[in-house]
Image (spheres, grey):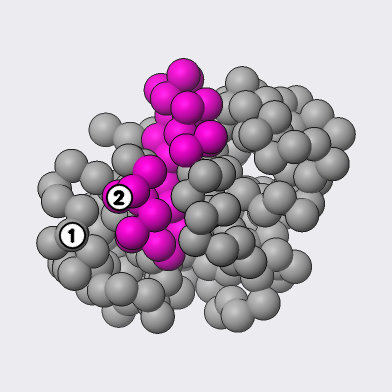
Amino acid sequence: MTNFTLYLVTDRELSSLPLEEAVEQAIQGGCTVVQLREKHACAREFYETALTLRAITRKYHVPLLINDRVDIALAADADGVHLGQSDLPCRAARDILGPQRLIGISAATLEEARKAQADGADYIGVGAVNPTATKTDTRTVTSSQLAQIKAAVSIPVVAIGGIHPKTLTGLRGTGVDGIAVVSAILSQPSPKQAARDLLEQFRGLRHA
């Protein structure tokens, strides 16, 4: 079973470190999943970055997921993909990727979450649970809606959107399986320490 507790989504523009170094530090600090998101890269650059990160994630036995691009995931032999509501449908992606690779689906409503599970998704990314500067086309999900979604599905639910130490308490009582983080790790001087602190805080929140 994949551990979705601390899910890193990359954004190379946020880090003062090379992306590869920042990702490795984040994993050393406790990140359990890495999603490579490259909104502005050409296919070749995306692929080459995926190969580089795949070597790092496999060193630490952490899954590497590719945002949006099923072709890049296959070409780079990544562990799966994460798809939005306007991307390739989950069932079509499953036909291409087969049963072994992970497929995550973004959802912001109960209906979308239930459909993702019915279509064979392995997990759901739900948000935005807070305002976020790293993605502009988000829909707001309240903590009560998040708890409803978590209660309605049996696959893991990962909260995403503006999650950092000061907003993390807003997830108390939702039962989510993990948090997806971008700037709260990558924009920090030490991604390793930032990941470690977030992981400790989230674990404390879940067991409070």
Asked if the magenta segment contains residue 69, the reply would be yes
As drawn, 139 above or below 77 = below
| 133 relative to 205 in the view: left or right | right
Residue at 62% in and 27% down: 24
Work out whether 6 lies above or below 106.
Answer: above
Q: Amino acid at mark 1?
A: Ile
Crowdedness of circle 1 by 10 Å Cα count: few (<14), some, many (20+)?
few
Point out residue 22 in the picture as x, y percentages from the top left corner: 70, 34
Residue drawn 40% across and 62% down? 69
| Image coords of residue 158 (percent x, y) | 45, 52
Q: Position of residue 120 (x, y in %)?
A: 18, 60
**Mark 2 highlights which residue?**
74
Q: Quadrant of residue 8?
A: top right
Query: Label 2 crowding class (10 Å Cα cut-off): few <14, some 14-19, many 20+?
Result: some
Q: Quadrant of residue 167?
A: bottom right
Mark 2 and 1 residues: CB-CB less than 8 Å, in contact? yes
* Residue furthest front in the image: 44
User: What amino acid is at disc 2?
Assistant: Leu
Q: Which residues are magenta?
A: 51-76
